[in-house]
Amino acid sequence: MHAESATGAWQRYRYRHIVVDEAQDLAAAHWKMLRAMVAPGPDDIFLVGDTHQRIYDNRVTLGSLGVHIRGRSAKLTLSYRTTREPSPLLGDLPTAAGTR
């Protein structure tokens, strides 16, 4: 991605950092676009995904697309989803239609 700046110089990368959620559902074309938007570096792309929640069959090898995660990734072993404790409180919230 190239954009011409006010000085007329070509600027190769538009962003310094990119955050990707639901990364498991991106196709190769999406990864290529993201790679083109940020310069390779130690903190270039932060991605979060869960292959067990994949809704598309977009299986890609990130390294072949210029997104290198080897030695830079971590697997969470503790669930950070909402626990059951807040559930009784949620019953007091109105529904999308405005009624309970």
Image (cartoon, rainbow, N blue to C red):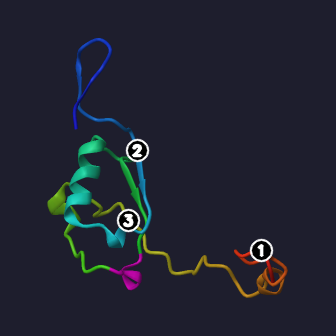
Residue assigned mark 1 = 98
Question: Quick one: quadrant of the N terminus?
Answer: top left
Q: Earlier in the sequence, mark 3 or mark 2?
A: 2
Spatial CA distance of label 3 from label 2 is 16 Å
Name the disc covering residue 73, or none.
3
Q: Earlier in the sequence, mark 3 or mark 1?
A: 3
Whether the magenta-drawn stretch holds residue 31 is answered as no
Q: Which residues are magenta?
A: 50-55
Tag in front: 3 or 2: 2
Image spot of residue 97 (x, y percent): 72, 76
| Secondary-structure class at tag 1 | loop
* Type of the residue with mark 2: His
Residue 67 makes an appearance in the image? no
Name the disc covering residue 18, or none.
none
Question: Quick one: quadrant of the C terminus?
Answer: bottom right
Image spot of residue 21 (x, y percent): 44, 64
* Type of the residue with mark 1: Gly
Name the disc covering residue 17, or none.
2
| Secondary-structure class at tag 3 | loop
Image quadrant assignment for residue 63: bottom left
Image quadrant assignment for residue 49: bottom left
Q: Is residue 16 left or right of residue 5?
A: right
Q: Which residue is found at the position 24% from the left and 67% from the top?
A: 27
Q: Which residue is found at the position 43% from the left and 74% from the top?
A: 75
In the rendered image of this protein, does residue 13 appear above or below residue 50?
above
Q: Is residue 40 left or right of residue 53?
A: left
| Secondary-structure class at tag 2 | loop
Spatial CA distance of label 2 from label 1 is 39 Å
Q: Which residue is found at the position 78% from the left and 80% from the top?
A: 90
In the rendered image of this protein, does residue 97 appear above or below residue 16?
below
* Type of the residue with mark 3: Ser
Q: Earlier in the sequence, mark 2 or mark 1?
A: 2
